[in-house]
Image (cartoon, rainbow, N blue to C red):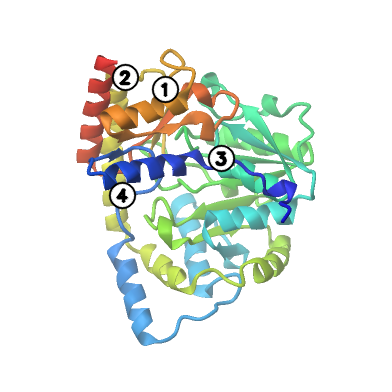
Amino acid sequence: MRRARRSKVDAFIVMDVMEAARRAEEAGRRIIHMEVGQPGTPAPAGARAALAAAMEAGALGYTVALGLPELRARIARLYDEWYGVDLDPARVVITPGSSGAFILAFTALFDAGDRVGIGAPGYPSYRQILRALDLVPVDIETSAENRLQPVPGDLADRDLAGLLVASPGNPSGTMLDRDRLAALIGATQAAGGQFISDEIYHGLHYEARAVSALEITDDCYVINSFSKYFSMTGWRIGWMVVPEDHVRTIERLAQNLFICPPHASQIAALAAMDCHAELETNRAVYARNRVLMLEGLPKAGFDRIAPPDGAFYVYADVRHLTDDSRALAAEILDRAGVAVTPGLDFDPARGAGTLRFSYARATADIEEGLARLAAFMAAR
C-alpha cells in the first residue's frame, strides 16, 4: 500500500537510545540513564490512592471531551496559586498528554502549508507533528548568547503563521523572563501570527520561577502536562488553556479526534495537584542533581553549556570532541554504561555537535553517572 508523504516523519532518536540501553541491561549491564526526559519517581501517592478508590467505586467510562469539570476548575486555581492569574475554568481543556494538546492546537490554529516557527534546539516532536499535519516547521536557530531561546529579531522576514516557544526549554532548560517573553509575544502578534507557549516544565525551577504567557496576554494558547512536575509521564494526561472564543472549536476537534482524555488519568491528576509536599521533595532532588551536573560535567570535559534555569536537562556543545554526536553517545553507552541523547533530535542542522544530559533520576545515579563520564573522558 502507498504511504502518504506527510507520514514520513523522522524517528525520535532518544527512543532509539532507550532501546539500546534496554538491550544492554537485558545483557546484564547496569546502565545509568541520562537520556530520558522523565522523572525517576512514580505518580504521587495520593494520586495512586485516589485512582484505586475510584476503580473500586465503579466503572470509568467516557468523560466529556473537555475533561472532568472538577479537574478543569482545579487547574484554573493553580494559575492563581502559581502566577496570580484569575482564569475561567471554561478555558481549560484536558488533553491526552501535551502531545494531544499540540495536535489540537496546530489543527485549530493553522491551515495546511502554514509556516510555524520553532526554536532550535527544541523538542523534536514539534517538528514531526507539524509535518504530519501538512504544516511547515521553520527552525529558528538560537544562539548561546541568547541562552538558546528565540528573540524578536529572529522572526524578521520569516512569513510565519505562528510561533511556538518553550520556557523552560527542552533540551536547554533555559527560561525567558517576563520582558523577553512579552517581547516575543508582541513580535509574533504584530506580524499577525498565533502564539503557543509550551509550559510543560513549569514547577521545575531552581531560582526565579517560570513566567506563564497568561500573565501577559489571553490571546495565546498555553500547553502543559502532568508528565514532568507531577511525575506522571505514562499516564498521558495534560491540559491547554485557550481564548474563550476558541473553546468550542477545540471541543469539536477533541470530540472527534480523542472522544475524551483517559478517565483514570484525570482522577489521578486531580489528586496529584494537592500532593504538594511530595512534589516539592522531588523538585529538591532535581535541584541537588542540577548542582552536581553543573559541577561534574565541566570537570569531565563537557564544559560548553548554557546553565539551565529549569526542567532537568543540561545541553552541551561537544564540537571540540566530535562531529558525530550519535556516534559519541553510542561510545559513551558502550564504554561508560551511561545513556545520553545526541543533539540531532533537537537541532537537525547543528545537533551533530551537541549532547543532552538528563538529571531526572535519583541523586546516587547522577553521582555514579558523572564519575563514569569523568573516567570515560580521561581514558578517551
Residue that numbered label 3 is attached to: 124
Evaluate whether residue 307 shows in this view. Answer: no
Mark 2 / mark 1, whichever is N-terminal = 2
The amino acid type of the residue labelled 3 equals Pro
Residue that numbered label 1 is attached to: 305
Task: Tell me if 321 is positioned left or right of 120 in this view.
Answer: left
Do the residues under discs 2 and 1 have CB atoms within 8 angstroms? yes
Note whether 295 is above or below 68 in the view shown.
Answer: above
* SS for dot 1: loop
Q: Residues within 10 Å of mark 4 (few under 14, many from 20)?
A: some
Residue furthest to the bottom: 58
Mark 2 / mark 3, whichever is N-terminal = 3
**Position in image of residue 61 (x %, y %):** 51, 81
Mark 4 / mark 2, whichever is N-terminal = 4
Task: Tell me if 204 is positioned left or right of 113 in this view.
Answer: left
Give the position of the N terminus as an image quadrant.
Answer: bottom right
The amino acid type of the residue labelled 1 equals Ile
The amino acid type of the residue labelled 4 equals Gly
Residue that numbered label 2 is attached to: 298
Disc 3/disc 1 C-alpha distance (Å): 20 Å
Q: Nearer the viewer, residue 9 or 120?
A: 9
Residue that numbered label 4 is attached to: 40
Q: Residue at x 33, y 60 (%)?
A: 43
Do the residues under discs 1 and 4 have CB atoms within 8 angstroms? no
**Position in image of residue 99 (x %, y %):** 56, 54
Residue 196: which disc?
none
